[in-house]
Image (cartoon, rainbow, N blue to C red):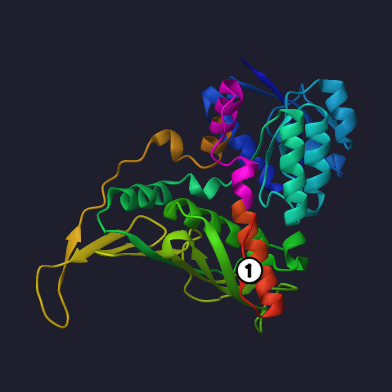
Amino acid sequence: MTFKAVLCGCGAMAKGWLKAIASHPPLAGKITIVGLVDVNVQAATALAQEFGLSHALVGTDLTDMLARTDADMVFDVVVPSARFNVVSTALKAGCHVLSEKPMANTLQEGKALIQLAAESGRTHAIVQNRRFIKGVRRMRRFVESGAIGDLTAIHCDFFLAPHFGGFRDEMEHVLLLDMAIHTFDAARFVASRVPQSAYCVERNPRGSWYAHGASANAIFEFSDDVVFTYRGSWCAEGRSTSWESEWRLVGSKGMLLWDGGDVFEATVAGDETGFMRGYKTVNVYENEDPQETDGHASVIGGFIAAIEGRSKPETIASDNINSLAMVFAAIESALTGKRIAISA
């Protein structure tokens, strides 16, 4: 089975999607890009030329493009403010939709899109590509193994200083909305728990080149008394962390540390008695499924497989709204100074 896809939004992020498809023959054999849509037609034309999509139509109007191409699905890579209109248009036209994150600009819009997908009988999923990497999958499996006992806490540090330019420089709550959702979603996946409340302090530090909210410190309460803390900044010049954050998972019997790159360190309590017990190292084996650790390609492949089998993709909107709810609870807490209950 092959699918006709329209790509909506032809900026830099769209290249990652197209590279993932082009570099994976199983995906390239199932997906034909039949149209590219962008408010800047020159950007769409340039992207078509760069990826050899000479057969694809180029335009500025999604409704018109869907009518002209009879597409099966829409790849939504537009800026967040345009997401609701793009996704709702595609779903109403009978297309499945795979969207960039965040899935919506508000929780209410997210709920409306979930309802629309249900009514249309189409799949709407989100590209949470950073949960589809080896480190995140390995943490999840290690927690499930019980090696460190019952999970009690997750702590993440994220400190970088990217100078993007463009829409991010003007966004409100830029770190929480545009980047922290990756870490929030990964923490929810690793913990396999339900987020219940949030308390957050958000700042735009001196020296920030962003308009608003370049740093945030948040505490989340998950079900089963699991606590997740996040310390992050997008204007932290100096020694940086990985883009995947630095992680410390605390269990009832030990800890797992991941530097966001290649280094894992797991330790559990030793057999000694007394005030300070020793600890011993535990191996963190590579046991990931290669199909689950290829970023964009894994997400797109899961999306296609779900449509073919009429099953639910891992990042379906009806589940991913829980990650979005974490973001908006953190924002509400930062604005009000209060602990906010989370309900998606």
**Residue 214 percent location from the top left of the image:** 65, 72
The quadrant holding residue 38 is top right
Quadrant including the C terminus:
bottom right
Measuring from the top left, give residue 267's x and y in whole percent. 23, 63
Q: Which sits in the foreground, 242 or 135?
A: 135
* Furthest residue toward top: 1
- Where residue 202 sits: x, y (%)? 64, 76
> What amino acid is labelled 1 in the image?
Ala
Q: Measured along the vertical axis of the image, is residue 22 above or below residue 281?
A: above
Q: Is residue 317 magenta?
A: yes
Front position in the image: 154 or 336: 336
Residue 225 among those drawn in magenta: no
> The magenta stretch spans which residues?
302-321
Q: Nearer the viewer, residue 289 or 227?
A: 227
Between 134 and 154, the one nearer to me in the picture = 154
* Residue 317 appears in view: yes
Element type at mark 1: helix
> Position of 5 compared to 44: left or right?
left
**Residue assigned mark 1:** 330
Residue 282: x and y in percent read: 20, 57
Overall secondary structure of the magenta section: helix
Residue name at image x 90 percent, y 29 percent = 64
Residue 106 occupies quadrant: bottom right
- Relative to 47, residue 339 above or below: below
Q: Is residue 188 left or right of residue 17?
A: left
